[in-house]
Image (tube, rainbow, N blue to C red):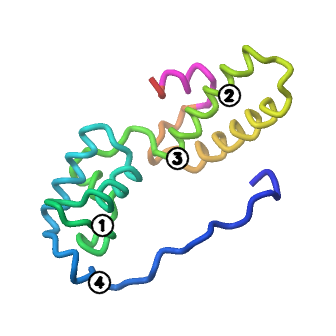
Amino acid sequence: MHTRRRGSSGSDKPTADENPEWSDVDADAVEERVVELAQQGDDPSQIGMKLRDEGVQGVPVPDVKLVTGKKVGEILDEHDAAPEVPEDLRNLLARAVRLRDHMDENQTDYQNKRALQNTESKIRRLIDYYRGDEIDEEFTYSYEAAVEIIE
């Protein structure tokens, strides 16, 4: 977003309309496992990776949406297990807190000062996107608010 160094991602997900034959898993079992992993504290992206790698009842789940017809976030919303703060915003807040702590110890690290400015800019843009739906209307970004959300 702020630099021209990195290109687009390396691979795309293969297109598929139906679940593969080798992944014969019940949709209800997948939903139960998704809610169970969310209650253990996993983020939606971590849930997807665990289902892909570990599977449900020993059978890998290549794509939750193909099995259940719903995305992981939709399943979590139905079962009231969705995280309070969206995952992408939470990750940016954690990064900003780490960078701010680093800058307190290393005031002359100008490269990371710029990285902190870029990260905080992304956070403000994302907060504007989520404001009203997933975040309170009155919420504004500050370092103290970020620390409170992360912990």
Residue at x 41% of width, y 53% of height: 45
The image quarter in which residue 141 lies:
top right
Q: How busy is the neighbourhood of tag 4: few (under 14 within 10 Å), some, or many (20 plus)?
A: few
Residue 6 in percent (x, y) is at 75, 59
The answer to if 37 sits in the magenta stretch is: no
For disc 4, the marked residue is 18
Q: Earlier in the sequence, mark 4 or mark 3?
A: 4
Does residue 25 sit above or below 99 in this rendering?
Answer: below
Q: Nearer the viewer, mark 3 or mark 1?
A: 1
Quadrant containing the N terminus is bottom right
Q: How busy is the neighbourhood of tag 3: few (under 14 within 10 Å), some, or many (20 plus)?
A: few
Residue type marked 4 = Glu
Q: Which residues are magenta?
A: 140-148
Residue at x 23% of width, y 70% of height: 68
Find the distance from the CA under tag 3 to the CA under tag 1: 20 Å
Q: Main secondary structure of the magenta part?
A: helix
Q: Earlier in the sequence, mark 2 or mark 1?
A: 1
Q: Which mark is residue 94?
A: none
Give the SS element for disc 1. helix
Q: Which mark is residue 88?
A: 3
Q: Nearer the viewer, mark 3 or mark 2?
A: 2
Does residue 145 appear to the left or right of 101 in the view shown?
left
For disc 1, the marked residue is 64
Q: How busy is the neighbourhood of tag 2: few (under 14 within 10 Å), some, or many (20 plus)?
A: some
Q: Earlier in the sequence, mark 1 or mark 4?
A: 4
Q: Furthest-top residue in view?
A: 105
Q: Which mark is residue 99?
A: 2
Give the SS element for disc 2. helix
Does residue 125 appear to the left or right of 149 in the view shown?
right
